[in-house]
Image (tube, grey):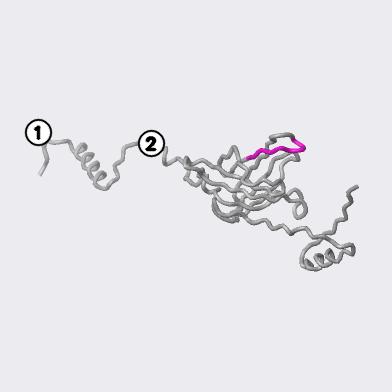
Amino acid sequence: MTDRDPSGRTPSPSLAALLAAALLAVAAGCATAPSPERDAAAAAPEPGDTDPRRFAGLWDGAIHYVPGSAELEATVELGVDAEGRLAGTIDMPPFDMLYHPLEDLRVEGAQVFFSYRRDSEVRGPNALFAFEGRLDEDGDLVGEFLESRGRIPFRFERIGDPGDPRPVLERRPLADLSPEGGELVQAFNEDEDKARLVLLLSPT
């Protein structure tokens, strides 16, 4: 049986074939009209490529001026606020900096950038100190710290999530020494499994 339109004419074989193919495509869910929005979405990078949440965490480590001998300890906390922007603070115990605010936080490709300001004897008041970092194959935050001496390498290990307690810095209390110095000898011998250094200081 051949379908006819209201005029009574029979569709040409080529037109009938095209209509049948279109109906089959629709039934199979394959007929999709071109869409600029869909094409743009297909070409867009994966969310992980630009998502600042991959840098979120509590990071603890050091800036390595001279690895093993001159290192500046620091703890960085990075998180994402309600508007999806990166925010954070930095602790630097040698400078009595705790929860010091970071600024200019941003993610560009595989890199994260952030900085802080503090008064510096070398660079003056409100000097800017910046970090340029990335995640390495071990998941550590590594990169370079920019200051007056140039670009200094750093490495921070992820030790927790944003909001987790900071590491506790343990400081041994100062001990009063007797004229014989027996307390110093005892303290020195108690730490025989560690590297030890004796400094003789004079007020003059």
Q: In this view of the protein, which residue sits in the foreground, 89 or 51? A: 89
Q: Residue 6 shows which numbered tag?
A: 1
Q: Is residue 126 above or below residue 190?
A: above
- In percent of the image, x 51 and y 40: which residue is there? 85
**Separation (CA) of disc 2 from disc 1:** 39 Å
Categorize mark 2 by other alpha carbons within 10 Å: few (<14), some (14-19), many (20+). Answer: few
Q: Position of residue 33 (x, y in %)?
A: 31, 37
Q: Is residue 35 above or below residue 66?
A: above
Q: Earlier in the sequence, mark 2 or mark 1?
A: 1
Q: Position of residue 134 (x, y in %)?
A: 60, 47
Left or right, residue 133 beside residue 2: right
Q: Quadrant of residue 8?
A: top left
Magenta part of the chain: 115-123
Residue identified by numbered label 2 = 37
Task: Identify the amino acid type marked 1.
Answer: Pro
Give the structural element (helix, strand or loop) at label 1: loop
Task: Identify the amino acid type marked 2.
Answer: Glu
Q: In this view of the protein, which residue sits in the foreground, 116 or 138? A: 116
* Predominant SS along the magenta part: strand
- In percent of the image, x 64 and y 52: which residue is there? 156
Q: Position of residue 50 (x, y in %)?
A: 51, 43
Q: Is residue 154 above or below residue 148?
A: below
Categorize mark 1 by other alpha carbons within 10 Å: few (<14), some (14-19), many (20+). Answer: few
Farthest residue, direction top? 7
Q: Quadrant of residue 177?
A: bottom right
Left or right, residue 136 beside residue 13: right
Mark 2 or 1, closer to the camera: 2
